[in-house]
Amino acid sequence: MSDYNTAKYLSKQMKARGLQKLKFYCQVCKKQCRDENGFKSHIRSPFHLKNISSVTQKDIDDYSQQFEDNFLLLLKSSHGEKWIEANKFYNEFIQDKDHIHMNATRFTSLNKFIQHLGKTGRIKIKLDEDKGTDVDNIDMGQLQISYIDRSHDNVMRKQQLNELESSQKSEQEIKIMLLQRQIENVKSTMPTTSIIDQTVESNSHLSTITKPEEINMHLSKPQMTKKVTKQKKKKKASSKNVFE
C-alpha cells in the first residue's frame, strides 16, 4: 500500500473518484474495482465469499425493486412524460455512484429491464422511425421511453384539459355561429308583416293605373254626354211646338 499523500496514493484516489465500469462493481460488498483483474481477485476473496453466501432470493428481489424505483423516480423528476432515448437516460442514471447496480438485480440487460417496465405499464416505449420493429433484438440507442404519470393530480389535470378541448369549437364553427346569430337578430328586428302588406298595396296600385289614352277617353266622355243631352232637349222642344 502506498504512503499517504504520495503521488501514487493521489493517483489512486483520483482514479477512485472517477466513474468506473459498472461490471467491475460488487453490489453485495459495495466495492468498485478498477479493472477485470481487480474484480476477479475481489470475488475470490474471503470477504466477498462470506457476503455472497448470505445473499437470498429476497435480497435480489429487494435490489431489483430499489433499482426500478430509483430508475422511475429519476425519469419522472428529470424528464416527466417527455420522450428520451433509453440508453441516454440510463447513462444519466448511472452517474450516481451510490445507485443500485443492475448486476445485483434479476435483470440481465437493459433491454430486458425496459421491456419489463413497458409490460407492467410503468413507461411507454416506441422505436425511432426507420429503425426496425423487433424490440427484442434492437439497439438501445433506437429505443425511446416516456414515463407514465398515474398520480391523482396528473390524472385530474389531463381530465380537465380533455374537457376543455372537447368544449372548445373550431374557429370556423365559431364564425359560422356568430354569422347565424347576426342574421337571426336582423330578421327579428325587421317588420316582416308590414313589408309584405306594403308590397301587396303597391302591386294593387300599380294594377289600377290606366294608360294615358284611357284617361283621355274618360275625360272626353262627359263632353259627349252633355252634347247628347242638349240635342235631346231640343228635340223635345221641337216636338212640343208641332203638336201645339
Image: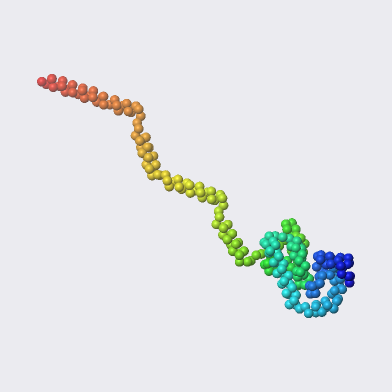
Residue in view at x 54 percent, y 50 percent: 174
Left or right: 177 with respect to 143? left
Q: Which residue lies furthest to the front in this view?
A: 5
What residue is drawn where x is 75% and y is 61%? 88
Q: Quadrant of residue 206?
A: top left
Q: Which residue is drawn at 85% across and 78% down?
A: 46
Image coords of residue 125 (percent x, y): 70, 63
177 or 193: nearer the viewer: 177
* Position of residue 205 measured from the top left corner of the image (x, y, whole percent): 35, 35
- In the displayed structure, 225 sits above or below 108; it is above
Looking at the image, the residue that sits furthest to the left is: 244
Q: Is 81 on the left-hand or right-hand side of 222?
A: right
- Depth order, front residue of 100/184: 100
Residue 41: where, in percent of width, then height?
Answer: 87, 73
The reply to whether residue 220 is in sight is: yes
Residue 183, x across and y down, in percent:
47, 46
Q: Please indicate, yes or no, whether residue 146 appears anywhere in the rendered image.
A: no
